[in-house]
Image (cartoon, rainbow, N blue to C red):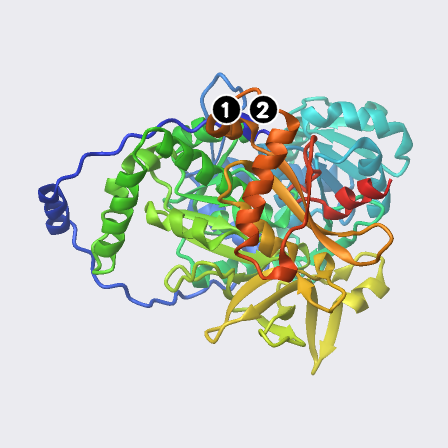
Amino acid sequence: MRGLENFKVPNFKFPKLKMEGIKEEIKAEPILPKKQIKYEPYDFKTIKEVFEKSTEKFSEKEFLLEKFDHKGLYKEITYKEFREDVIGFGTALNKILDLEGKRVVIIGENTYGWYVSYMTMLCGTGIAVPVDKELPANEIENVVKRSKASAIIYSPKKKDVIQKIKDNLDGIQYFIEMYSEKNEARDKEIGMKYLIEEGKKLVNSGDNSYMEIEINPDEFKVLIFTSGTTSSAKGVMICNRNLAQNINAVSAYVKIYDTDRLFSILPLHHTYESSIGFLVPMANGSSVAICEGLKYIVPNLKETKPTGMLAVPILIENLYKKINANIVKSKKEKLVNTMIHLTNTLKGVNIDIKRKVFKEILDNLGGNLRIIVSAAAPIDAKIGKWVEDIGIRFLQGYGLTETAPISALTPEYESKIGSVGKAVNCAKIKIANPNENGEGEVLISSETLMLGYYEDEEATKEAILEIDGERWFNSGDIGYLDENGYLFITGRSKNVIVTQNGKNIYPEEIEQLFVNVSEVKECMVYGKEEEGSKELVISIKVIPDYETIEEKHGKDLSKEDVYKIIWDEIKKVNKKLTSYKAIKNLEIKKDEFEKTTTMKIKRYVELQKDKN
């Protein structure tokens, strides 16, 4: 995960707890038996409903927190300020620039201008086209052209790349720079800050046209291109109802309070962050603190003290490894394990003192963190259990860009670690053609399901099946449902390795066994053809954790020494696998894996490198 080499977690100190102290805590804070409460879900149809309700009800409350200067403090922006900026911007885009109903690209890091731009589009301007800020210039150009956009809203950090491709974008009427006060559309360039102020003047003079726009819940409103090179990426068409149902679905399974604060790390152009990390907290009057970047995670957590965090497995895995490495280094592993066992036993009789016992760890994560949600890829159940062991509720979600994104979620009142959750209240999930273990392709029918693929009817028909009058999306994931309806994902059908004797091997299943191997930083399992044969050999590419290897095995090691150390760990993993899944080939990777913005390895890119 790019940037995590600078990720620092302090050494933790643990309190010396005597049994008398434990007894006092037990006596002081008894917890009532847990009730199986099912929350009453919201029933929003559009995001404009959410915007109007929340910005009025919570007008004086802080909504977004951002640090515009790294050396300065976080700035708090209220719901009222956000409302006024969105309405002002929307009025200007429609009345001054005549962009109503048109497509507008939004590109930039997680910043206040991005939130305002996206909400402005959803509430009445046109179709939002969120674009990955990490794409190279030629791919950004390709997306802009494919989307038939009329304008681009971009952050100052993307100014250079926009200038680079500007002359090739004849269809763009306006280039709108966030935070800029440029007041003339010379060379088609104009400032967002200027437009917001001009729009506010129109509103103050009585122009209420923007807020009078009625939103059709089923109208095409967002165009998102899936991960991958732009030439092969599909455009996913999403409507307001899809997004609103994400809010409704979460509200049935997880209680979010207006006192909650979410920590925004993941990129907003991805539906996981923009829907669950932006729209959900807004619907509940919660606040969102924007992380400055991966290397600032710990200091930003301490500064903003969030209660919830959306994450991807690689981030949680690195937290787990770093914290536990420091525990081992401080020679307190036995104490921590003892306290985990003790606090789990007490929690079993409805006495929860975890947050007091593990206060040192929690304080280094801000002190208030009560929920971590993992999604976008499978995660080792052991790590989810560890998160719960230290006093944080661990939830998992499941979905794809095509389901905007949520289709399954862990109910906080009925969790099951290892599963990605149950189908949400607006969705149904079933397994197609299950094998003897109940595993098969995951099919999803949901009100969050996309309208279809942009300008690709053939791909839409391949992905969405009509069964008994219902639309079922073939996710491409492999999984199974247990007797209580909990979904377990075991792999991707596209990644499956099929042996000569017809056995299916899912590389993700094997990769998860390396999470606890400290010598391995990252890895990718794949099938490699043997020379002169079509038989696939189970192989692995490994990026070693050289820092850990030096600490455990000594310095000045040769390449052969590192290879042997990693291979010895592979042999230990192989003992946990059936013989046909055993890894037989190792490649030590020198460079970083190419990844999507949700930190998943681009397998097809990595495998293509081997062919070239």
Residue name at image x 57 percent, y 20 percent: 556
In this picture, is 321 found above or below 416? Answer: above
SS at badge 1: loop
Give the residue number, with chain letter if any, for mark 1. Answer: 554
Q: Is residue 567 visible?
A: yes
How many residues crowd around disc 1 within 10 Å: few (fewer than 14), some, or many (20 or more)?
Answer: few
Q: Quadrant of residue 509?
A: bottom right
Label 2 element class: loop
The residue depicted at 71 percent of the width and 34 percent of the height is 134
* Residue 372 picture location, percent across and down: 44, 47
Residue at 73% from the left image edge and 47% from the top image edge: 603
Q: Amino acid at mark 1?
A: Gly
Asked whether the beta carbons under mark 1 and mark 2 sit within 8 Å of each other, the answer is: yes
Quick one: 212 or 261, which is closer to the camera?
A: 261
Q: Is residue 264 left or right of residue 351?
A: right
The foreground one among 252 and 318 is 318
Residue 205 visible to the viewer: no
Residue ID for mark 2? 557
Position of the N terminus, as image quadrant, is top right
Q: Amino acid at mark 2?
A: Leu
Q: Which image quarter: residue 602?
A: top right
Q: Residues within 10 Å of mark 2 (few under 14, many from 20)?
A: few
Q: Give the alpha-carbon distance from disc 1 to disc 2, as whole Å.
A: 7 Å
Compared across the picture, whether 363 is left or right of 109 comes to left
Vertical placement of residue 405 versus 305, above or below: below
| For residue 521, side relative to residue 590 (left or right) | left
Coordinates of residue 276 in the picture (x, y in percent):
54, 50
Return the x and y of residue 355 as percentages of the image width and height.
27, 43
